[in-house]
Image (cartoon, grey):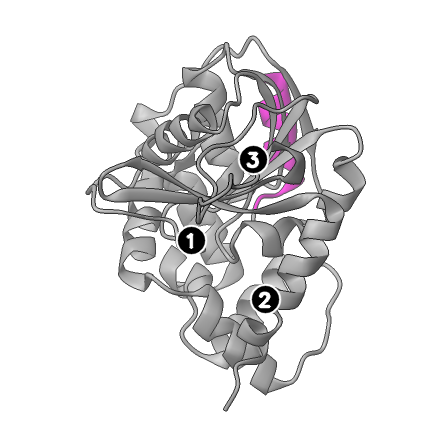
Amino acid sequence: MVNLVAAQKPLMNGLMKMAGVQPYSVEIEPGTVMNFWVPCETVKKPGKGEKKVTHLEKPTKPVVVLVHGFAAEGIVTWQFQVGALTKKYSVYVPDLLFFGGSITDKPDRSPTFQAEYLVQGLRKLGVEKCVVVGFSYGGMVAFKMAQMYPHMVEAMVVSGSILAMTDSISVEALNRLGFSSSAELLLPNSVKGLKALLSVAAYKKLWFPDRLHKDFLEVMFTNRKERAELLEGLVISNKDATIPSFPQRIHLLWGEEDQIFKKELAYNMKEY
């Protein structure tokens, strides 16, 4: 039986190319490949006799990097924003490692690790400066990017995310939502589990048939072992939590009914 989510990917590719971005894979180092959606105008057309693109041109417009959350790969998360941004900006949408075909043989699973490889990938694509937009898990990666590479990250937009997932924040959120672990919430293995995640993650409740939920699980929740390790690498001890001094402009964009990271956390971050 055809997987409906997988079957729509060629259509998605076509629509995103019309919107101004197309997929491109970057080998950051042997054993590590990160997939990006890059501005179409930066892709150098193959020369005569060449079978594939050899390199990209540098972006000519201000760069915006859209970093996805934990429940879906990059373009699925940001598909409705891309077209609104590409007229004024060079838009890059990465798939973080272990999402959307991005893979590594390195053992590290921390947000710092994700940020380091994302920056290396962007540099290989010719990006020197950018504004980073991070959602949920992607926001924690974005904060690490801004902290470690202030000369690259000029400004940030963070939505539904925090500086770091401390053990107290993790325990409080899981207890409040009724889940025993982050993996139970963010790595569902059944239609029932996916519905529970979507009921927490989405404000507007949308109905989809069970068949579509099942197909989404098969396509979007690959590399389950590695993603479980990413969740383990996300939580740090309260005593290890620090508040960096960020030179960048930071815009916090929050939903009043965010069930995972309550808006009080956003107010606290603003004060810090």
Name which quarter of the figure residue 266 lies in: top right
Q: Nearer the viewer, residue 53 or 93?
A: 53
The residues bearing labels 2 and 1 have C-alpha atoms spaced at a distance of: 15 Å
Numbered tag placed on residue 99 in the rendering: 1
Verify CB contact (< 8 Å) between mark 3 and mark 1: no
Residue type, mark 3 in image? Lys
Q: Which callout, 2 or 3, points to the residue nearer the camera?
A: 3
Tell me the SS state at disc 3: loop
Q: For residue 16: magenta?
A: no
Please give left or right for residue 249 compared with residue 229 in the image. Answer: right
Q: Which mark is residue 9?
A: 2
Q: In percent of the image, x 56 and y 27: which residue is there?
A: 57
User: As displayed, is residue 135 above or below residue 132?
Assistant: below
Magenta stretch containing residue 270, yes or no?
A: yes
Q: Give the percent coordinates (x, y) of residue 240.
A: 30, 25
Residue 44 is marked as 3
Rendered location of residue 68, percent (x, y): 55, 45
Q: Which is more N-terminal, label 3 or label 2?
A: 2
Which range of residues does the magenta coloring cover?
A: 261-272
Q: SS at mark 2?
A: helix
CB-based contact (under 8 Å), mark 2 and mark 3: no
